[in-house]
Image (cartoon, helix red, strand yellow):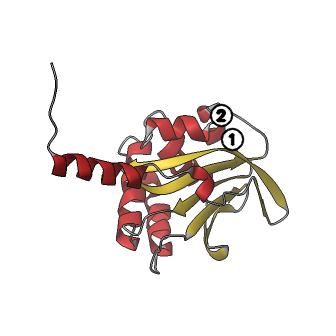
Amino acid sequence: MTFKVNRPLSILLMILASFSITPTNALDIPNTMEYQGTKLTLNGHGPRVKMFMKVYENSLYLQSSNSNAEEIMSDDAPMAIRIDVTSSLVTVDAMKNALNEGLEKSTGNNIVPIQKEVDQLTSTFNSDVSNGDYYEFIYLPDAGTNVLKNSEYIDTIPGIEFKKAFFGIWISENPIQKNLKKAMLGG
């Protein structure tokens, strides 16, 4: 049995494939990150894909390699998430919505205990987002999650419960994308 695919459809599929298959080495993802005297090492990274398009590259930084998601989420130790925007389709509103949806999913639809912190996170997205921008969310015990855009400090969101939920967006039992979780855990 043979299948015929009409020419316009095959061209469209090739175009969509070219958007979603971008070499990861095209980004300059650092192997280490240093913030306020704390050095972190890249644990793993991978692309966030929506509707066949890579929208950002997500990286997890830890003090030492770890592939145990539960341990990472509950650990009160320095760690970071870096988001490198790779699509011009990413907007401020899209970032806010995606993070809010991810937090709801991460917390089993119970963000009430951390609603104040979620609102604080949302307020940090107050400027345009462009392809090539990057965000760093650096958790430091006794301080909270520092939010930076293109290495410029924006705010610090307190609390380990927020940190657990935030990191859970990507590495919880119910992550936003399972193959991204695997990649971030070094798999």
Residue 71: mark in rendering: 2
Q: Decide if residue 63 is on the left or right side of residue 185.
A: right
**From the viewer's perspective, is residue 114 above or below residue 67?**
below
User: Residue 169: x and y, percent?
Assistant: 48, 47
Label 1 sits on a secondary structure element that is loop
Badge number at residue 102: none
- Residue 84 vs residue 39: left or right? left
Disc 2, SS: helix
- The residue at the point 48 percent across, 57 percent down is 56
Q: Residue at x 38, y 57 (%)?
A: 98
At label 2, counting other C-alpha atoms closer than 10 Å, the crowd grade (few under 14, some 14-19, many 20 or more) is few
Relative horizontal placement of residue 133, taking residue 62 as reference (left or right): left
Asked if residue 50 can be seen in this view, the reply is: no
Query: Where does the image place residue 33, in percent across and percent down from the top left?
Result: 76, 59
Give how far apart the Cα atoms at labels 1 and 2 are: 6 Å
The x, y position of residue 6, in whole percent, is: 14, 43
Label pair 1/2, CB-CB below 8 angstroms: yes
Quadrant where the C terminus sits is top right
Name the residue furthest top.
1
User: Which residue is drawn at the image coordinates 43% and 59% (left, top)?
Assistant: 115
**Pointer 1 residue:** 75
**Residue sitting nearer the eye, 16 or 85:** 16
148 versus 167 height, above or below: below
Q: Nearer the viewer, residue 88 or 167?
A: 88
